[in-house]
Image: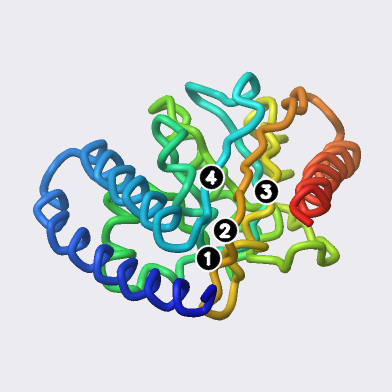
């Protein structure tokens, strides 16, 4: 039954996404904010479909730690859903994505129009400078910048591999960092069709204050995110 419901969801999800993408095309000529709002509508309908078809609901915890204005957010990344759900609970999100994703029709167009932050992972020092500069621009617009410290999706419970981008932003911006834990990969695996019933949790943890040394910051960030994410995995068993 889970497989059948998962296949049905994927059919409905891609049909809905195609319809939404076509309807949003005129927004490419409109103000940036309109596109972000439209993406939020697409995300909310996607969440409703996920719950109705697959029995997967979403819970946001730690709302007292959730930023409203300019903020740096470092989130655990386990599946594509991590780039969808935040549009429903953050007021004006801009997430960091690799430039290879821009070649995807519609996705790439709306990512650029929505002011997402594009990173060339082969650019090394130059790419880091651009990442910092682009993030500064988004923060001036009172946006919440979401970066995935590992740079790519990881299996639930797998050994983490945190990259230097988040440390560069933390150091150069002089802002607190808001860690976010999740168990999303349990219910929406990075690969395959199966969508397992249950609760996807996004948990905002206590912010890490600005000013820590790089090594101390990275150690604290990883400890907080991984401990909380592992706890969510155990909770879901």
**Which mark lies nearer to you, 2 or 3?**
3
**Which mark lies nearer to you, 4 or 1?**
4
Can you identify the residue that label 2 sits on?
Answer: 127
Can you identify the residue that label 1 sits on?
Answer: 120
Image point 83% across, 52% down: which residue?
234
Q: How dense is the environment of label 1, judged by Cα within 10 Å: few (below 14), some, or many (20 and up)?
A: some
Q: Which mark is first along the chain, 2 or 4?
A: 4
Can you identify the residue that label 4 sits on?
Answer: 58
Q: Position of residue 140 (x, y in %)?
A: 43, 26
> Label 2, label 1: how many angstroms apart (C-alpha)?
6 Å
Q: Secondary structure at mark 3?
A: strand
Q: Are marks 2 and 1 in contact (CB under 8 Å)?
A: yes
Image point 76% across, 47% down: which residue?
232
Q: Nearer the viewer, residue 110 or 188?
A: 188
Q: Are marks 4 and 2 in contact (CB under 8 Å)?
A: no
Image quarter in which the C terminus is found: bottom right
- 95 on left or right of 155: left
Q: Compared with residue 84, is residue 30 higher up or lower down, i.e. above or below?
A: above
Q: Nearer the viewer, residue 201 or 197?
A: 197
**Which mark lies nearer to you, 3 or 1?**
3
Image point 45% across, 72% down: which residue?
5
Q: Nearer the viewer, residue 62 or 125?
A: 62
> Label 4, label 2: how many angstroms apart (C-alpha)?
34 Å
Q: Which mark is first along the chain, 1 or 4?
A: 4
Q: Are marks 4 and 1 in contact (CB under 8 Å)?
A: no
Tell me the quarter of the picture where residue 184 sits. bottom right
Q: Are marks 3 and 1 in contact (CB under 8 Å)?
A: no
Can you identify the residue that label 3 sits on?
Answer: 182
Q: Secondary structure at mark 4?
A: strand
- 46 on left or right of 120: left
> Label 3, label 1: how many angstroms apart (C-alpha)?
26 Å
Q: Compared with residue 209, is residue 37 higher up or lower down, i.e. above or below?
A: below
């Amino acid at each position: 039954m889970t497989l059948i419901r998962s296949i049905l969801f994927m059919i409905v999800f891609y049909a809905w996404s195609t319809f939404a993408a076509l309807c949003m095309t005129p927004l490419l000529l409109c103000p940036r904010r309109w596109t972000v709002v439209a993406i939020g509508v697409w995300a909310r309908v996607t969440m409703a479909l996920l719950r109705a078809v697959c029995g997967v609901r979403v819970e946001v915890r730690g709302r007292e730690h959730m930023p409203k204005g300019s903020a740096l957010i470092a989130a655990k990344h386990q599946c594509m859903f991590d780039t969808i759900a935040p549009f429903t609970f953050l007021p004006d999100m801009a997430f960091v994505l690799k430039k290879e994703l821009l070649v995807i029709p519609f996705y790439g167009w709306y990512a650029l129009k929505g002011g997402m932050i594009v990173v060339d992972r082969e650019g090394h020092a130059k790419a880091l400078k651009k990442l910092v500069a682009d993030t500064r621009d988004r923060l001036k617009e009172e946006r919440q910048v979401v970066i995935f410290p590992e740079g790519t999706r990881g299996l639930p419970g797998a050994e983490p591999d945190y990259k230097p981008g988040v440390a560069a932003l933390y150091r150069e911006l002089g802002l607190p960092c808001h860690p976010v834990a999740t168990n999303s990969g349990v219910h929406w695996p990075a690969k395959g069709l199966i969508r397992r019933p249950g609760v996807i949790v996004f948990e905002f943890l206590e912010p890490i204050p600005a000013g820590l040394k790089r090594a101390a910051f990275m150690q604290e960030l990883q400890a907080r995110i991984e401990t909380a994410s592992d706890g969510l995995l155990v909770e879901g068993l």
